[in-house]
Image (cartoon, rainbow, N blue to C red):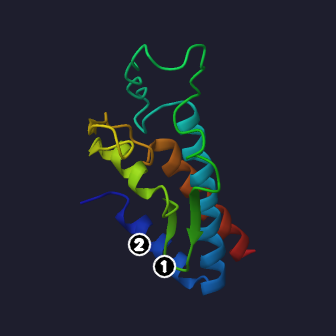
Amino acid sequence: MNEFKPFENKLAGLIASLSPAARRRMTAEIAKQLRTSQQQRIKRQQAPDGTPYAARKRQPVKGKKGRLKRAMFTKLRTNRYMKAKGTSDTAVVEFAARVQRMARVHQEGLVDQPSRFSQKVKYDDRQLLGFNTLDFELVDKIVIGIIRAGCN
């Protein structure tokens, strides 16, 4: 048996006692904070477990000369493409519909065709979204803060 089970049950009761509007505010705040955390981690090019992303594959030499490559996923991590939503029951961080397929290919390391005329490419898996211990602590901090504010 989990030694924190009684604590989790009381916490679930306290969360359930919040009004739907307060729960919606809480989940929206959790989603925003998690999105920020995920964006910063993607900027550092790290998987949720702290390991660095697999490096880009070398491009053929016949490409443009002097062209600088920017870091991977710079546009993908913007608020325009990475959406945060909170309902009274869930907090969601997801990619916008236009980029979901591309994000899934990288997240799971699938095979994709980068353009219409190119060959299929097997991508290395680069976990874009995921939880680590800091994310769990962040959620705990927000939930406890909301409950404290509700009790006062």
SS at circle 2: helix
Quarter-wise, where is residue 108 in the image? top left
Residue occupied by mark 1: 13
Residue located 49% across and 51% down the image: 136
Task: Tell me, for residue 145, which label it has, or none.
Answer: none
Query: Is disc 1 in contact with disc 2, using a CB cutoff of under 8 Å?
Result: yes
What residue occupies the far right of the structure in this picture?
A: 152
Is residue 147 something that shows in the picture? no
Give the residue displayed 27% in from the left and 37% down from the top. 119
Image coordinates for residue 8, horizontal then vertical, percent: 42, 66
Query: Closest to the observer: 132 or 145?
Result: 132
Viewed as shown, does residue 142 lie left or right of 4? right
- Where does the image place residue 65, in percent across and percent down from the top left? 56, 14
Expressed as whole percent of the image width and height from the top left, the position of residue 95 reads 50, 58
Q: Which label is found at residue 9? A: 2
The span from disc 1 to disc 2 (Cα, nearest Å) is 6 Å
Amino acid type indicated by mark 2: Asn
